[in-house]
Structures are given as structure tokens and as C-alpha cells.
Amino acid sequence: MQEYHLDERDLRLLHALQIRPRAPWAALAPVVGADAVTLARRWSALEGAGLAWITAYRGPGAKYTGAIIEIDCAPANIASATADLADDDEVLSIDQTAGGRDLVLTCLCQSDADLGRFVLDRLPSIAGVKTTRTHRGIRLLADAQQWRLRSLQEREIARLELGLPQPTAAQRGVPSEVENAVAAILRHDGRASVAHIAKSAGISPVRAKNALLALLAEKRLIVRLEVARAYAPWPVSVWYFLRVPVTQVEAVAGRLVGLQEVRFVATTAGLYSILMMVWLRRIEDMTVLERQLGERLPFAEIMDRSIVLRTPKHMGKRLTADGRRIG
């Protein structure tokens, strides 16, 4: 039995934080339906239990090279290879899966040269790794910042979005050392205050605020809420590997983005045209989803799929076997 349970009040709070992850508690209170003190206390409990957290990562406005890497391991080495890979900064997430691969890595590198070093030099050095298949990202069309828990009503969502507009840049050209410092602080705590950012980065509060607004407005940095999948209403995670005629790739990928179950869609230069990851309520819903895809997108051929058994690392954070954040 699971020790924790996310009730509807928790889900409403988390949905609000998906929309505006850095919003003041007082601004969220009228929409969620609880006072600011209660929201802050409940968030502290959820975060402390590892059920939800807010982190940051490089966005489309920043220069990076993304890739999804499939790895086949000797069965006796899956655990040790996972632990070894979890120490690499290039590895954003690790999924241990059932299907045609043992591990699925989500990687972010600063350049193609760095990706090459990771694939050609680093991976062969890991004991137990038998084969790898690298899918260099071409275009990221959707990630989990667009995925929603669906606990707030449309009018409540609109109220949040209108009452708390997205940040606008007060300056441009944030120095790289300041950008790196702010990114590191927000990766640890996506709700870190401007005062905390200023003190930790060794800069003035005004400079910290301007840098933060610029990085968020330019999407050089994305701040988002994460929730422990096993405790959410969608505990089943599946990777899909699709092949699509080149003339239909953009159209198919664009339609996949609109599916409520989708948390990741990218076009790639690998064996498959499109990679997609979804969260489902039940394992049986795979059949429903695949039938819908076949009816609506006949050009998209599902070449393979893998069910996620465990996610030991997600968005740079270590997770327990049941998906709660460690530390």
C-alpha cells in the first residue's frame, strides 16, 4: 500500500503550479480555494515527501543538443549501469523499461561534439552496455510543461493566466556566468526567491530579478512542476517509437501534441521519425490510444513501444523506486 495520497485539493494546487510555478501563494489562493498559509503548508508537505517539486532546465531559447538514447544491457548490469549513468550531467532522465530496450535516456548536451563524446566514448566504458541507438533530436514539439493534471476548470485556468501574465524581459544579454548561476539555483528549487537567487549568485536583487525575467521570457530557462507519477491519476508511462513518411512528419507530430496523454513529442534523425511519451490511467488504455492513433493518423506507424517500469532519474533529480524525489 502506498503511504501517501494526493487528494483533489492537492491536485488543484499542483495544477495551478503547472500553469504558474513561481506564483505567490496569495495569487493562487482564490483559484485553488484555500488561503495562502494553507497552500504554503501543503506545498511544503508535498515537496518534503518527494511527491511534487519544481525544477528548471534549459529551454528552446538556449543552445543545446538533445537526444533520446536506447540502451540494451546485460540483465545483471542494468542496476549498476543505471547508477553509473545517473552521475552524468548530460543525462537528464533515465527510464528503465520493458520492451525492445532496457533503458531510455533523455540527454541534453551543449553541442553535437559533446553528444558525440558521450555516445562514442562514455557509453562504451559502462560495464554491461551491449548496444545503443541514438536518436538525435531535430525538433521538440512538446514536453511536460504543456501537460496538465486537469483538476481546475477552464474559467479557473483563464483567471490564473490573465491574472498572472508570463514574464517579460527587462533586459537582454544576460552574462553567461549569471545565467549559469541562476539556472543552477532554480534546478535545485524552482520557487527560489529573488533575494535567495541574489545572495546565492553574489549579485544585487535588482540584477537577479532582471536576469530571471530575461531568462524566463526568452525561454532560455524553463521552470516547471514535477509530480511523482505513481501517486498521480496517470501512473502508467509508455514510450512510443513511430515511423512516418517524410512528407507527413510535421503534420502528424503537430496532431500528437494535442493529445491529453502526451508528455513528450520530438522529431528525430534516428531510426524513427517521431518519439512520443505518454501517461495513462491504466495499462489497458494503451489499446484505446493506439486505436485512436490508427484511426486519426493512418500515416503514423507504431514501430515499437516500451512501458516504463522505473524512472531512477528525472529532470536531473534522483527518484525512489516508486518515483518520489530523493532529497
Image: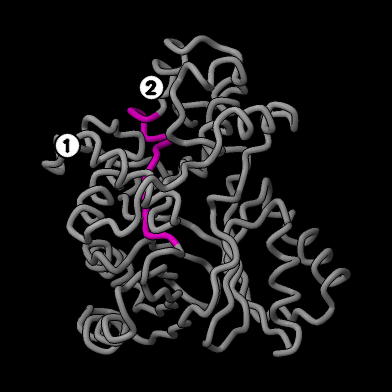
Q: Which residue is mark 1?
A: 204
* In magenta stretch: residue 58: yes
Left or right of 160? Residue 37 is left
Q: Residue at x 42, y 73 (%)?
A: 66
In the rendered image, the residue lying farthest to the front is 171
Left or right of 204? Residue 269 is right
Q: Which residue is mark 2?
A: 45
Q: Quadrant of the C terminus?
A: top left
Q: Residue at x 55, y 36 (%)?
A: 165
7 is higher (above) or lower (below) than 200? above
Inspect the image, locate mark 2, and give the three-letter code of the amino acid beneath it.
Ala
- Whether residue 77 is visible here, answered yes or no, is yes
Read off the magenta span: 47-59
Along the viewing direction, whichever of 39 and 322 lies nearer the viewer: 39
- Dot 1 or dot 2, earlier in sequence: 2
Q: Can you give x and y, in whole percent of width and height, for residue 268 in the image?
A: 54, 81
Left or right of 118? Residue 69 is right
Q: Can you give x and y, in whole percent of width and height, for residue 14 in the image?
A: 53, 31
- Whether residue 312 is visible here, answered yes or no, is no
Inspect the image, locate mark 1, and give the three-letter code of the amino acid beneath it.
Ser
Left or right of 279? Residue 230 is left
Query: What number is the disc on residue 46?
Result: none
Q: Residue at x 39, y 40 (%)?
A: 54
Q: Residue at x 68, y 61 (%)?
A: 257
